[in-house]
Amino acid sequence: MKEILTVSNLKVYFKSIYGDYKVLDGVSFSVFKNEIFGIAGESGCGKSTLAEGILRLIRPPGYIKEGKIVFEGVDLLKLNEAELRKIRFKKLSYIPQGSMNSLNPVLKIKEQVMDAIIDHTDIPKKDAEELAIAVLQNAGLPPKVADMYPHELSGGMKQRVVISIATALKPSLVIADEPVTALDVVTQRAILESIAEMREKFRTSIILIAHDMSVHAEIVDRLAIMYAGKIVEIGSIYDIFEQPLHPYTRLLIDSIPSLGKKAIKGIPGLAPSPLNWPPGCRFHERCPFSTDICKKREPALCNMGNEHYVACHLYGERK
Protein backbone atom coordinates (compact mmCIF):
# COMPACT_ATOMS: atom_id res chain seq x y z
CA MET A 1 0.00 0.00 0.00
CA LYS A 2 1.14 3.55 -0.75
CA GLU A 3 1.96 5.84 2.15
CA ILE A 4 0.13 9.16 2.31
CA LEU A 5 1.84 10.40 5.50
CA THR A 6 5.21 9.55 7.04
CA VAL A 7 6.25 11.01 10.39
CA SER A 8 9.91 10.54 11.34
CA ASN A 9 11.47 11.23 14.76
CA LEU A 10 9.04 14.04 15.55
CA LYS A 11 9.82 15.93 18.75
CA VAL A 12 7.57 18.63 20.20
CA TYR A 13 8.77 20.41 23.34
CA PHE A 14 7.22 23.07 25.56
CA LYS A 15 9.47 25.63 27.24
CA SER A 16 9.06 26.40 30.93
CA ILE A 17 11.06 27.97 33.74
CA TYR A 18 11.93 24.44 34.86
CA GLY A 19 13.20 23.32 31.46
CA ASP A 20 11.66 21.75 28.37
CA TYR A 21 8.63 19.49 28.71
CA LYS A 22 9.37 16.79 26.11
CA VAL A 23 5.73 16.01 25.39
CA LEU A 24 6.47 14.34 22.06
CA ASP A 25 9.91 12.79 22.09
CA GLY A 26 10.77 10.97 18.88
CA VAL A 27 7.63 9.59 17.21
CA SER A 28 7.76 7.73 13.87
CA PHE A 29 4.95 6.05 11.90
CA SER A 30 3.26 5.96 8.50
CA VAL A 31 -0.35 6.15 7.34
CA PHE A 32 -1.46 4.46 4.11
CA LYS A 33 -3.98 5.68 1.55
CA ASN A 34 -7.62 4.87 2.36
CA GLU A 35 -6.66 3.63 5.83
CA ILE A 36 -8.08 4.37 9.27
CA PHE A 37 -5.04 4.56 11.55
CA GLY A 38 -5.73 4.65 15.28
CA ILE A 39 -3.65 6.21 18.06
CA ALA A 40 -4.39 5.15 21.65
CA GLY A 41 -2.92 5.80 25.08
CA GLU A 42 -3.59 7.41 28.45
CA SER A 43 -4.36 11.11 28.80
CA GLY A 44 -1.12 13.10 28.68
CA CYS A 45 0.80 10.62 26.52
CA GLY A 46 1.08 13.10 23.62
CA LYS A 47 -1.78 12.07 21.29
CA SER A 48 -3.28 15.54 20.78
CA THR A 49 0.15 17.16 20.61
CA LEU A 50 0.99 14.71 17.81
CA ALA A 51 -2.10 15.81 15.86
CA GLU A 52 -1.28 19.48 16.34
CA GLY A 53 2.33 18.87 15.39
CA ILE A 54 1.38 17.22 12.10
CA LEU A 55 -0.93 20.14 11.31
CA ARG A 56 1.68 22.73 12.35
CA LEU A 57 -0.66 24.14 14.99
CA ILE A 58 1.88 24.18 17.82
CA ARG A 59 2.08 27.63 19.41
CA PRO A 60 4.57 29.14 21.90
CA PRO A 61 5.76 28.11 24.40
CA GLY A 62 5.57 24.91 22.37
CA TYR A 63 7.86 24.30 19.42
CA ILE A 64 8.84 21.51 17.06
CA LYS A 65 12.34 20.52 18.08
CA GLU A 66 13.08 18.25 15.11
CA GLY A 67 11.67 15.62 12.78
CA LYS A 68 10.05 15.20 9.36
CA ILE A 69 6.38 15.19 8.41
CA VAL A 70 6.05 14.10 4.78
CA PHE A 71 2.49 14.39 3.44
CA GLU A 72 1.90 13.35 -0.18
CA GLY A 73 5.62 13.75 -0.86
CA VAL A 74 5.95 17.21 0.76
CA ASP A 75 7.69 17.89 4.08
CA LEU A 76 5.18 20.05 5.97
CA LEU A 77 7.90 21.39 8.26
CA LYS A 78 9.53 23.14 5.31
CA LEU A 79 6.40 25.03 4.23
CA ASN A 80 5.57 28.62 5.16
CA GLU A 81 2.15 29.66 6.44
CA ALA A 82 0.82 30.61 3.00
CA GLU A 83 1.84 27.23 1.57
CA LEU A 84 0.26 25.42 4.52
CA ARG A 85 -2.98 27.31 3.99
CA LYS A 86 -3.24 25.88 0.48
CA ILE A 87 -3.09 22.37 1.93
CA ARG A 88 -5.37 22.74 4.95
CA PHE A 89 -9.01 21.70 4.47
CA LYS A 90 -8.42 20.87 0.79
CA LYS A 91 -5.92 18.07 1.43
CA LEU A 92 -5.34 17.87 5.18
CA SER A 93 -8.13 18.51 7.65
CA TYR A 94 -8.74 18.36 11.40
CA ILE A 95 -11.55 17.47 13.78
CA PRO A 96 -10.27 18.98 17.05
CA GLN A 97 -10.65 17.61 20.55
CA GLY A 98 -13.67 19.21 22.18
CA SER A 99 -14.93 19.97 18.68
CA MET A 100 -18.48 20.52 19.89
CA ASN A 101 -17.22 23.67 21.62
CA SER A 102 -15.30 24.90 18.57
CA LEU A 103 -18.35 26.22 16.74
CA ASN A 104 -19.00 29.97 16.75
CA PRO A 105 -22.15 30.57 18.87
CA VAL A 106 -23.25 33.68 16.93
CA LEU A 107 -23.02 32.29 13.39
CA LYS A 108 -25.51 30.02 11.65
CA ILE A 109 -24.29 26.52 10.88
CA LYS A 110 -24.20 27.00 7.12
CA GLU A 111 -22.11 30.17 7.53
CA GLN A 112 -19.48 28.24 9.48
CA VAL A 113 -19.26 25.55 6.82
CA MET A 114 -19.10 28.24 4.14
CA ASP A 115 -16.20 29.95 5.93
CA ALA A 116 -14.00 26.89 5.47
CA ILE A 117 -15.02 26.57 1.81
CA ILE A 118 -14.58 30.24 0.86
CA ASP A 119 -11.33 30.76 2.79
CA HIS A 120 -9.59 27.81 1.13
CA THR A 121 -11.01 27.87 -2.42
CA ASP A 122 -12.09 30.30 -5.13
CA ILE A 123 -15.70 29.07 -5.05
CA PRO A 124 -18.27 31.91 -5.29
CA LYS A 125 -20.39 32.58 -2.20
CA LYS A 126 -23.59 31.25 -3.79
CA ASP A 127 -21.96 27.97 -4.80
CA ALA A 128 -20.31 27.73 -1.38
CA GLU A 129 -23.72 28.00 0.27
CA GLU A 130 -25.12 25.22 -1.89
CA LEU A 131 -22.11 23.04 -1.13
CA ALA A 132 -22.41 23.75 2.60
CA ILE A 133 -26.05 22.68 2.65
CA ALA A 134 -25.20 19.55 0.64
CA VAL A 135 -22.38 18.41 2.94
CA LEU A 136 -24.58 18.92 6.01
CA GLN A 137 -27.27 16.73 4.45
CA ASN A 138 -24.65 14.14 3.48
CA ALA A 139 -23.72 13.99 7.18
CA GLY A 140 -27.30 12.95 7.98
CA LEU A 141 -28.50 16.34 9.20
CA PRO A 142 -31.95 17.67 8.20
CA PRO A 143 -32.07 20.74 5.88
CA LYS A 144 -33.28 23.05 8.67
CA VAL A 145 -29.98 22.64 10.54
CA ALA A 146 -28.24 24.91 8.00
CA ASP A 147 -30.14 27.94 9.35
CA MET A 148 -29.80 27.04 13.03
CA TYR A 149 -27.28 28.15 15.64
CA PRO A 150 -25.00 25.76 17.59
CA HIS A 151 -26.97 26.10 20.86
CA GLU A 152 -30.04 24.71 19.08
CA LEU A 153 -28.31 21.41 18.27
CA SER A 154 -27.65 18.29 20.31
CA GLY A 155 -24.10 17.14 21.00
CA GLY A 156 -24.24 14.52 18.26
CA MET A 157 -25.55 17.04 15.73
CA LYS A 158 -22.76 19.49 16.60
CA GLN A 159 -20.23 16.74 16.08
CA ARG A 160 -21.69 15.97 12.65
CA VAL A 161 -21.42 19.67 11.77
CA VAL A 162 -17.73 19.71 12.67
CA ILE A 163 -17.18 16.56 10.61
CA SER A 164 -18.98 18.28 7.71
CA ILE A 165 -16.66 21.29 7.97
CA ALA A 166 -13.60 19.04 8.02
CA THR A 167 -14.72 17.02 4.98
CA ALA A 168 -16.45 19.72 2.89
CA LEU A 169 -13.55 19.89 0.41
CA LYS A 170 -12.94 16.11 0.38
CA PRO A 171 -9.41 16.12 1.87
CA SER A 172 -7.15 13.12 1.38
CA LEU A 173 -6.32 12.92 5.13
CA VAL A 174 -8.45 13.82 8.15
CA ILE A 175 -7.11 13.81 11.71
CA ALA A 176 -9.95 13.20 14.20
CA ASP A 177 -8.96 13.92 17.81
CA GLU A 178 -11.32 12.23 20.30
CA PRO A 179 -14.39 12.71 18.04
CA VAL A 180 -16.76 10.71 20.28
CA THR A 181 -15.73 11.99 23.72
CA ALA A 182 -18.66 13.10 25.94
CA LEU A 183 -21.26 11.47 23.66
CA ASP A 184 -23.63 8.70 24.70
CA VAL A 185 -22.92 5.24 23.30
CA VAL A 186 -25.72 5.36 20.71
CA THR A 187 -24.45 8.69 19.34
CA GLN A 188 -20.87 7.41 19.51
CA ARG A 189 -21.76 4.54 17.22
CA ALA A 190 -23.51 6.88 14.77
CA ILE A 191 -20.46 9.18 14.64
CA LEU A 192 -18.09 6.24 14.12
CA GLU A 193 -20.31 5.02 11.27
CA SER A 194 -20.12 8.52 9.75
CA ILE A 195 -16.31 8.38 9.92
CA ALA A 196 -16.28 4.97 8.25
CA GLU A 197 -18.62 6.27 5.53
CA MET A 198 -16.28 9.24 5.01
CA ARG A 199 -13.48 6.81 4.17
CA GLU A 200 -15.68 4.88 1.73
CA LYS A 201 -17.26 7.91 -0.01
CA PHE A 202 -14.20 10.08 -0.45
CA ARG A 203 -11.36 7.49 -0.28
CA THR A 204 -10.07 9.53 2.64
CA SER A 205 -7.34 8.36 5.01
CA ILE A 206 -8.15 8.99 8.67
CA ILE A 207 -6.06 9.25 11.82
CA LEU A 208 -8.41 8.47 14.72
CA ILE A 209 -7.17 9.53 18.16
CA ALA A 210 -9.00 8.05 21.16
CA HIS A 211 -8.04 6.78 24.59
CA ASP A 212 -10.87 4.22 24.50
CA MET A 213 -9.53 0.94 23.10
CA SER A 214 -13.05 -0.34 22.39
CA VAL A 215 -13.59 2.58 19.97
CA HIS A 216 -10.51 1.55 18.01
CA ALA A 217 -11.64 -2.07 17.96
CA GLU A 218 -14.80 -0.99 16.13
CA ILE A 219 -13.30 0.94 13.25
CA VAL A 220 -9.51 1.18 12.72
CA ASP A 221 -7.31 -0.89 10.41
CA ARG A 222 -4.03 -0.40 12.28
CA LEU A 223 -3.37 0.89 15.78
CA ALA A 224 -0.43 2.67 17.42
CA ILE A 225 -0.09 2.60 21.21
CA MET A 226 1.52 5.70 22.77
CA TYR A 227 3.09 5.99 26.19
CA ALA A 228 5.06 8.89 27.67
CA GLY A 229 5.68 10.74 24.41
CA LYS A 230 6.61 7.70 22.33
CA ILE A 231 4.97 4.92 20.32
CA VAL A 232 5.52 1.56 22.01
CA GLU A 233 3.58 -0.71 19.62
CA ILE A 234 2.07 -0.59 16.12
CA GLY A 235 0.14 -3.36 14.41
CA SER A 236 -3.06 -4.36 12.67
CA ILE A 237 -6.12 -4.11 14.90
CA TYR A 238 -6.30 -7.92 14.90
CA ASP A 239 -2.67 -8.35 15.99
CA ILE A 240 -3.00 -5.71 18.70
CA PHE A 241 -6.06 -7.34 20.26
CA GLU A 242 -5.29 -11.01 19.57
CA GLN A 243 -1.51 -10.92 20.12
CA PRO A 244 -0.59 -7.78 22.08
CA LEU A 245 3.16 -7.68 22.66
CA HIS A 246 3.95 -4.69 24.85
CA PRO A 247 2.97 -5.07 28.53
CA TYR A 248 1.32 -1.63 28.41
CA THR A 249 -0.87 -2.70 25.48
CA ARG A 250 -1.92 -5.83 27.35
CA LEU A 251 -2.85 -3.79 30.42
CA LEU A 252 -4.86 -1.32 28.31
CA ILE A 253 -6.85 -4.19 26.80
CA ASP A 254 -7.35 -5.79 30.22
CA SER A 255 -8.81 -2.53 31.49
CA ILE A 256 -11.69 -2.59 28.96
CA PRO A 257 -14.98 -3.37 30.76
CA SER A 258 -16.93 -6.39 29.49
CA LEU A 259 -19.82 -8.54 30.65
CA GLY A 260 -17.59 -11.58 31.13
CA LYS A 261 -15.18 -9.89 33.55
CA LYS A 262 -15.65 -10.17 37.29
CA ALA A 263 -13.59 -7.03 37.92
CA ILE A 264 -11.99 -4.27 35.88
CA LYS A 265 -8.21 -4.24 36.06
CA GLY A 266 -6.44 -0.91 36.36
CA ILE A 267 -2.85 -0.04 35.52
CA PRO A 268 -0.88 0.59 38.74
CA GLY A 269 1.11 3.77 39.25
CA LEU A 270 1.19 7.00 37.29
CA ALA A 271 2.80 8.03 34.01
CA PRO A 272 6.11 9.91 34.45
CA SER A 273 6.50 13.64 33.90
CA PRO A 274 7.58 14.87 30.44
CA LEU A 275 9.89 17.30 32.24
CA ASN A 276 12.07 14.40 33.37
CA TRP A 277 11.48 11.10 31.59
CA PRO A 278 13.00 8.13 33.46
CA PRO A 279 16.06 6.39 31.99
CA GLY A 280 15.60 3.18 30.01
CA CYS A 281 12.09 2.06 29.14
CA ARG A 282 9.65 4.74 30.26
CA PHE A 283 7.14 2.11 31.35
CA HIS A 284 9.53 0.11 33.56
CA GLU A 285 8.30 1.62 36.85
CA ARG A 286 4.78 0.30 36.17
CA CYS A 287 5.64 -2.85 34.22
CA PRO A 288 5.12 -6.29 35.84
CA PHE A 289 7.92 -7.76 33.66
CA SER A 290 10.58 -5.11 34.27
CA THR A 291 14.22 -6.25 34.47
CA ASP A 292 17.52 -4.45 35.05
CA ILE A 293 18.05 -3.71 31.35
CA CYS A 294 14.65 -1.98 31.23
CA LYS A 295 15.90 0.56 33.78
CA LYS A 296 19.08 1.34 31.85
CA ARG A 297 18.48 1.12 28.09
CA GLU A 298 15.60 2.50 26.04
CA PRO A 299 14.20 -0.18 23.69
CA ALA A 300 13.96 0.54 19.95
CA LEU A 301 10.76 0.05 17.97
CA CYS A 302 11.41 -3.25 16.16
CA ASN A 303 9.49 -5.21 13.51
CA MET A 304 8.43 -8.56 14.95
CA GLY A 305 7.04 -9.74 11.62
CA ASN A 306 3.91 -8.95 9.60
CA GLU A 307 4.52 -5.21 10.18
CA HIS A 308 3.89 -5.65 13.90
CA TYR A 309 6.25 -3.31 15.76
CA VAL A 310 7.05 -3.18 19.47
CA ALA A 311 9.53 -1.34 21.69
CA CYS A 312 10.21 -3.79 24.54
CA HIS A 313 13.27 -5.63 25.88
CA LEU A 314 11.18 -8.79 26.34
CA TYR A 315 11.71 -9.48 22.63
CA GLY A 316 15.40 -8.63 22.39
CA GLU A 317 17.05 -6.27 19.91
CA ARG A 318 15.76 -6.80 16.37
CA LYS A 319 15.81 -4.81 13.15
Image (tube, helix red, strand yellow):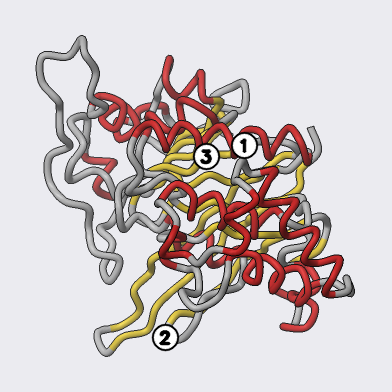
Q: Residue 77 bears which disc, if any? A: none
Which residue is at a point 77% across and 66% down the rendered structure image? 129
Q: Does 53 sit left or right of 172 as displayed?
A: left
Helix, strand or loop at mark 3: strand
Residue type of the residue flagged with mark 3: Gly
Report which residue position mark 2 lands on.
Answer: 61
Report which residue position mark 3 lands on.
Answer: 38
Label 3 – label 2 distance at C-alpha: 28 Å
Helix, strand or loop at mark 2: loop
> Residue 40, relative to residue 279: is it above or below?
above
Check contact, mark 2 vs mark 1: CB within 8 A: no
How far across and down, in percent of the image, does residue 104 sit?
50, 74
Q: Residue 36 bears which disc, if any? A: 1
Label 2 – label 1 distance at C-alpha: 31 Å
Check contact, mark 3 vs mark 1: CB within 8 A: yes
In the image, 193 versus 131, the foreground residue is 131
> Residue 57, relative to residue 173: is it above or below?
below
Label located before the other in sequence (2 or 1) = 1
Which residue is at a point 72% across and 39% down the rendered structure image? 32
Residue type of the residue flagged with mark 2: Pro
How crowded pointer 2 is (Cα within 10 Å; few <14, some 14-19, many 20+) is rated as few
In the image, 300 versus 136, the foreground residue is 136
Is residue 64 shown to the viewer in this render? no
